Amino acid sequence: MVGDSEKRRRAPHLGPERRRPLILDAALEVFSTNGYPGTTMQSVADAAGVTKPVVYDCFANRDELLLALLAREEQHLVVTIVAALPANPSVGTPEEHVIEGLTAFFTEVTKQPQSWRIVFGAQYGAAPVVAERVRAARAFLVESLRLTLVQSLPGVTDPDANLPVLAELLASMTESCARMLAGNETERTPAELARTVSQVVGGGFGNV
């Protein structure tokens, strides 16, 4: 059996390009447990079973490491959001779209909680460049919801004023529920959370 000291001696020979995915996996594990303040180059090196210089061979500093990790995990966000959007928004009611889409979305969150912890949690206490990357991901979520509402509510009064408000409200509740699921802070199922969000936001669909 190969010990930790042997793994550390061998690691540099893999080369930065081959080592990067392994370092990112270790960073995801560390961040998921310790958050931004507790994610250091040394803690990532320890989790990966390598020395700190090996981590620096792959990433110049902690922010570069976390930005690379965010870029990778955001791909899960994009894929999940697109998959959760209704295929035909003109069929069914807005409330039905919310329940169906959010149930699918929240189910994916429970399948990959570590990915969602960094996407939703990296902005807290992080360097400005990292926080800005998280805000950009959230802006994509809000815009996706706004476009869906535009298709779902073709007759809405003053859509330029009302749809962004509804999209922001829906995005805020979606983010909060996703964070609770990713952090094991609720015993409610994805379907139950989706129905709750729909009930709260649903009044807005009928009054705009």
Image (cartoon, grey):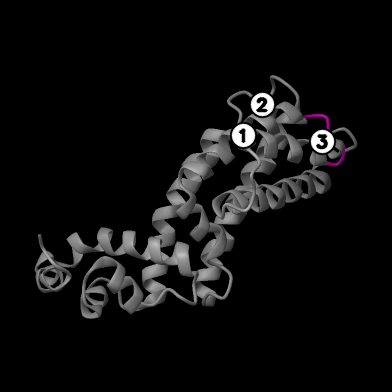
Residue 113 falls within the magenta-colored stretch: no
Q: Position of residue 91 (x, y in %)?
A: 69, 19
Image height check: is 191 above or below 115? Answer: above
Outermost right residue: 207
**Which quadrant of the rendered structure holds the C terminus?**
top right
Report the disc number at residue 103.
Answer: 1
Q: Are marks 1 and 3 in contact (CB under 8 Å)?
A: no
Q: Which residue is mark 3?
A: 202
Magenta residue span? 154-158
Q: Residue at x 26, y 77 (%)?
A: 56
Toward which corner of the image does residue 139 lie, by quadrant?
bottom right
Amino acid type at circle 2 is Pro
Q: CA distance from mark 1 to mark 2?
A: 16 Å
Who is closer to the viewer here, 85 or 120? Answer: 120
Q: CA distance from mark 2 to mark 3?
A: 16 Å
Task: Check the image and name the residue furthest to the top.
Answer: 91
- Tag 3: amino acid: Gly
**Tag in front: 2 or 3:** 3
Q: Which residue is mark 2?
A: 89
Of tags 1 and 3, which is closer to the observer? 1
Residue 167 lies, with reference to residue 26, above or below; the image says above
Left or right of residue 67: residue 109: right
> In what quadrant of the picture does the N terminus appear?
bottom left
Q: CA distance from mark 1 to mark 3?
A: 15 Å
Q: Which comes before the other along the chain, label 1 or label 2?
A: 2
Please name whichever residue, 186 or 171, is drawn nearer the observer in this view of the structure: 186
